[in-house]
Image: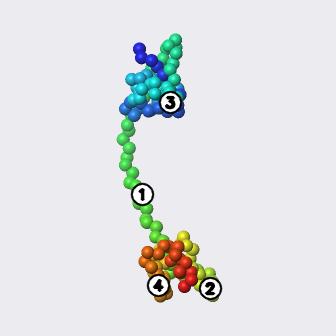
C-alpha cells in the first residue's frame, strides 16, 4: 500500500486534470508531481500509518447535452460626432460657443472640425494637442 496524504490547500490538481479539494485523501498515483515537493510546498501532509486512509472518492463526470444558444449580437457603439455634440451644446446656450468634452470626441472628429475652421495642424499630433488647438480656434 502506498503512502496516503491529506490535501491541505484549497484545491490541488492531479492526473488527468482531476481536482482534489481540501481534506481529500490522495496517493502518489493520483498526483502528477512528487509528493515530497507537494509536502514541502504545504499543499499536502502525510497521514499517520495508524489511521487507515479512505480511498479518495472518484467523481464521474456526466456530460449532459446542452442546447447551443446563439450568442447575442451587440451593435457597435459609435461616438457622437463633434458637430452633433456642438449642436447639442448650442441648444443649451446659443450665446457661447461650446466645445464638447475631451472624452466625448474622437481624433478624427477633432481633425475634421479643425479642417472646417481652416486651422492648420500636423497629422501626427496627439489628441491632446489637437484638442488644445480646437479650444483656441
- Label annotation for residue 41: 3
Mark 1–mark 3 distance (CA, rounded to whole Å): 44 Å
Mark 4–mark 2 distance (CA, rounded to whole Å): 24 Å
Mark 2–mark 3 distance (CA, rounded to whole Å): 68 Å
Mark 4 crowdedness (10 Å alpha carbons): few <14, some 14-19, many ≥20:
few
Q: Position of residue 52 (x, y in %)?
A: 49, 14
Q: Are marks 1 and 4 in contact (CB under 8 Å)?
A: no
Q: Is residue 67 above or below residue 47?
A: below
Q: Is residue 24 visible?
A: no
Disc 3 element? loop
Pointer 2 residue: 96
Which of discs 4 and 2 lies nearer the camera? The answer is 4
- Label annotation for residue 72: 1
Quarter of the C terminus within the rendering: bottom right
User: Is 18 situated left or right of 44 in this image?
Assistant: left
- Label annotation for residue 120: 4
Q: Compare residues 56 and 72 and report the one nearer the observer.
A: 56
Mark 1–mark 2 distance (CA, rounded to whole Å): 43 Å
Amino acid at each position: 500500500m502506498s503512502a496516503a496524504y491529506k490535501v491541505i490547500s484549497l484545491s490541488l490538481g492531479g492526473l488527468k486534470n482531476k481536482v482534489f479539494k481540501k481534506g481529500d485523501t490522495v496517493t502518489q498515483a493520483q498526483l502528477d508531481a512528487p509528493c515530497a515537493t507537494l509536502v514541502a510546498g504545504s499543499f499536502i501532509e502525510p497521514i499517520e500509518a495508524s489511521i487507515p486512509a479512505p480511498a479518495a472518492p472518484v467523481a464521474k463526470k456526466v456530460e449532459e447535452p446542452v442546447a447551443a444558444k446563439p450568442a447575442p449580437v451587440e451593435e457597435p457603439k459609435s461616438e457622437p460626432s463633434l458637430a452633433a455634440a456642438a449642436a447639442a451644446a448650442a441648444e443649451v446656450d446659443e450665446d457661447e460657443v461650446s466645445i464638447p468634452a475631451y472624452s466625448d470626441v474622437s481624433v478624427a472628429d477633432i481633425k475634421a472640425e479643425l479642417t472646417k475652421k481652416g486651422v492648420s495642424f500636423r497629422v501626427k499630433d496627439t489628441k491632446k494637442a489637437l484638442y488644445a488647438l480646437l479650444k483656441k480656434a
